[in-house]
Amino acid sequence: MDEIVSEIGRKNNCTFCGVFRRQALDRGAVMLGANKLVTGHNADDMAETILLNLLRGDIARLSRCTSIITGEEGALPRCKPFKYTYEKEIVMYAYFKKLDYFSTECIYSPNAYRGFAREFIKDLEALRPRAILDIIKSGESFRISLDVKMPEQGVCERCGYISSQKWCKACVLLDGLNRGLPRLGLNRTRTSKKSSSVNEDGYCGENKDHHVRPGKLRGNVPRSSLDF
Amino acid sequence: MGTDSVESNDTVHLNLEFGGGLEILFGSIKCHSVDIPLNSGSEKLKMEHLLVWVRDNLLQERPEFFMKEKSVRPGVLVLINDCDWELCERLNATLENNDTVVFISTLHGG
């Protein structure tokens, strides 16, 4: 991650880390012969994610992020059993059971957008603890308007894994890094009509409307609206 | 559990613990054995005074990670003798000699 950050700077770090980390989990799990992937996302994480997707207008993710099981149609379904468990409960449990507890913070997290959502939700929780569960309930109850164009699921041309674009997000990011184009695959709000979603959860192929055509870019030239 | 030592009139002896990464703000030391001076005129030590004392005397850096206004930063759990302080009046809870107060941060970015 340190190498990546030295290439891309201090913004959008979560995008790279999340995408590559998810890919590593997926590939590693398959190598071990696993057929289910279970993560430790808790209620606080869920509430933050719902709020983040709301703030970014990421309808595709908003519709999916509250599902306790995802990817059932694929080879490696994922599940979040702690979806309704408050982070406080988990920390208390770990403390009283004297479990090994890792609390090292990612050094790039102070710049993360998620931090603002987290701060807000912590303030909400202090005033009304139920707010976290209520946000999740609201998120689960969202129904997407039929007018919204949703991405269709296909496969990545480069690596064959699940993707809603020609290339999956991991391949796009990796290609950008290897070719010295650190902005490849990231948000470009000026050039596209609807801004594409900055991927934080590591879900492959989440580039909604903004289709990147790697062959047409010209290296580290400052971007203008004529590029697309 | 009876107290071993006679409570002196002007200090309260406490065992403080910092966890969940919070110890970094306190010289990376998790356990601190401290004697808190009572404000002149007050008979009992309250949590809100302890917080101020800790911030002013024990905290080595970044006070905003420990306290927000008069209370702990949201996301920091407080246990008084292994009991969640939400059950004992939070800032108003009184502390006795040889009590143990634990502060655990649940805030880990990333």
Image (cartoon, rainbow, N blue to C red):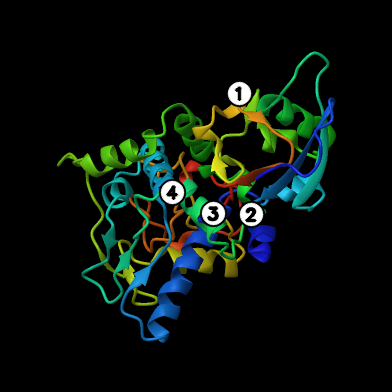
Mark 4 = which residue?
A45
Question: Could you tell me the amino acid type at mark 3?
Answer: Cys
Residue under label 3: A14
The answer to which image quadrant residue A110 occupies is top right
Q: Name the residue carrying label 1.
A: B92
Whether labels 4 and 1 share one chain: no
The amino acid marked with disc number 2 is Glu
Amino acid type at image mark 1? Asn
Q: Quadrant of the N terminus of chain A?
A: bottom right
Dot 1: what SS?
helix
Mark 1 vs mark 2, CA separation in Å: 31 Å
Classed neighbour count for the residue bearing mark 2: other residues with Cα under 10 Å, few (<14), some (14–19), many (≥20)? some
Front position among marks 3 and 4: 4
| Disc 3 to disc 4, C-alpha distance | 14 Å
Q: Chain of mark 4?
A: A
- Residue B14: quarter of image: top right
Q: Position of residue B66 (x, y in %)?
A: 68, 37
